[in-house]
Image (cartoon, helix red, strand yellow):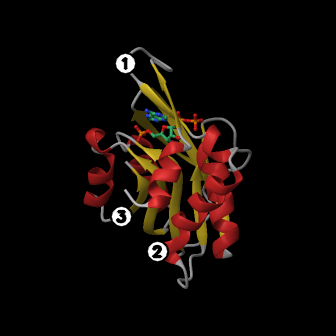
Amino acid sequence: MDNTTSELAASIRSIPDYPKPGIIFRDITTLLGNPRAFRRAVDELVQPYAGTKIDKIAGMEARGFILGGAVAHQLSSGFVPIRKKGKLPHDTVRIAYSLEYGVDEMEMHRDAIEPGEKVILVDDLIATGGTAVGATKLLRQIGAEVVGACFVIDLPDLGGRRKLEELGVSVHTLVE
Ligand code: PRP
Ligand code: ADE
């Protein structure tokens, strides 16, 4: 592990049996509250895309909003929220998905992306990949070109990264 990886890993708190028995919850509030770790995480997330024109960052509710907003600012891109169902006021596209500890539905505004726009997905963590795969399908449904996805944390045993790569999305992560 290099210095940045170990500093980021040390700033993430692990909570056993949350939100359900058997889940080890990786809590990034401790990373976000540490100015140095937060800046490092954002700098590392944007690194592969520096110098590339990215039209929009799509962030998944809720932790993807915090990191995605910072990444969008750094890349001078727009930001598109992908929200849990029932929160967006205009015409939406919706998809059901499952994640490590449940099932849900997510939505985005149908007019959030112009066809052909280049989009990067941002979230704090990829586990089963249910959330990121669902988001990729929604984005493609409205004509986005999903050029990549980045996450602070990958839980490799849960296979999400592989599922996303099988859909042709290149994946960038900072800590396993
Ligand atoms: C968490 C995390 C990812 C997702 C990853 O979000 O922030 O979005 O789970 O899991 P997966 O790879 O198995 O789909 P959660 O739905 O708990 O929402 P929150 O950010 O609102 O807590
Ligand atoms: N989302 C899915 N699995 C998670 C985990 N183990 N910790 C935090 N967020 C998650």
Q: Residues within 10 Å of mark 1 (few under 14, many from 20)?
A: few
In the image, farthest residue toward the bottom: 51
- Tell me the CA gap for discs 2 and 1: 34 Å
Q: At numbered mark 2, what does the secondary structure look like: helix, strand or loop?
A: helix
Relative to 3, 85 lies left or right: right
Identified by mark 1, the residue type is: Gly
Q: Earlier in the sequence, mark 2 or mark 1?
A: 1
Quadrant (top left/top right/bottom left/bottom right) for the N terminus: bottom left
Question: Which residue was labeled with disc 2?
Answer: 48
The spot of residue 88 in percent (x, y) is 70, 44
Question: Which residue was labeled with disc 1?
Answer: 22
Q: Is residue 26 visible?
A: yes
Question: Which residue was labeled with disc 3?
Answer: 169
- Tell me the CA gap for discs 2 and 3: 14 Å
> Of circles 2 and 3, which is in front?
2
Q: Is mark 3 within 8 Å of ligand 1?
A: no
- Tell me the CA gap for discs 1 and 3: 30 Å
